[in-house]
Amino acid sequence: AGELQKRMSQLRSVLSDHLDPMCGEEEPDVEGELLVMLASGHVSPGMQSFLSSTLTEHGLRRLAKMVDTAVQAVHGILLDQVQPAAEVVTFLVGEVKGLAALG
């Protein structure tokens, strides 16, 4: 957690350096910047500066491995927990439709 806090602090500092003084923002919203980047693909100048100066080839490999591991974990949860629940819901909806057709 110490490394993450250090990186988040670095990112906050870089984003502060790139804030537009006319916008009236006092402190950058690191989580918001990351969310916007992940959701829309839009990268602010501060975020781009941080990523281009911080991410090395080794860091990118590590990030890719972490993302792959996370995707595999989500896939496992979907197969083990969500799929059986969805099958039960589908069955029950069919039963309710059948009962509604009879009544």
Image (tube, helix red, strand yellow):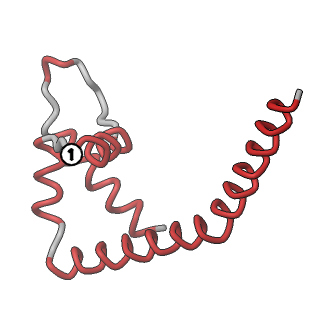
Q: In which quarter of the image is the C terminus?
A: top right
26 up-or-down from 57: above or below: above
In terms of secondary structure, where does tag 1 sit? loop
Most distant residue in the right direction: 103
Going 10% across and 61% down the picture, which residue do you hit? 52
Where in the figure is residue 6, as x and y percent of width and height? 35, 62
Q: Quadrant of residue 22?
A: top left
Q: In terms of depth relative to the viewer, which is nearer, 90 or 13?
A: 90
For label 1, the residue is 41
Where in the figure is residue 70, as x and y percent of width and height? 45, 70
Going 26% across and 52% down the picture, which residue do you hit? 11
Report crowding for label 1: few under 14, some 14 to 19, many 20 or more residues within 10 A (C-alpha). Answer: few
79 up-or-down from 88: above or below: below
34 up-or-down from 28: above or below: below
Going 31% across and 33% down the picture, which residue do you hit? 27
Q: In terms of depth relative to the viewer, which is nearer, 83 or 39?
A: 83
Q: Horizontal placement of 33 versus 88: left or right?
A: left
Q: In terms of depth relative to the viewer, which is nearer, 103 or 10?
A: 103
Where in the figure is residue 48, as x and y percent of width and height? 12, 51
Give the amino acid at mark 1.
Answer: Gly
Q: Horizontal placement of 6 versus 90: left or right?
A: left
Q: In which quarter of the image is residue 100?
A: top right
Most distant residue in the front direction: 102
Q: Horizontal placement of 23 versus 12: left or right?
A: left
Q: In which quarter of the image is residue 98?
A: top right
Going 21% across and 42% down the picture, which residue do you hit? 15
20 up-or-down from 50: above or below: above
- Tally of marks: 1
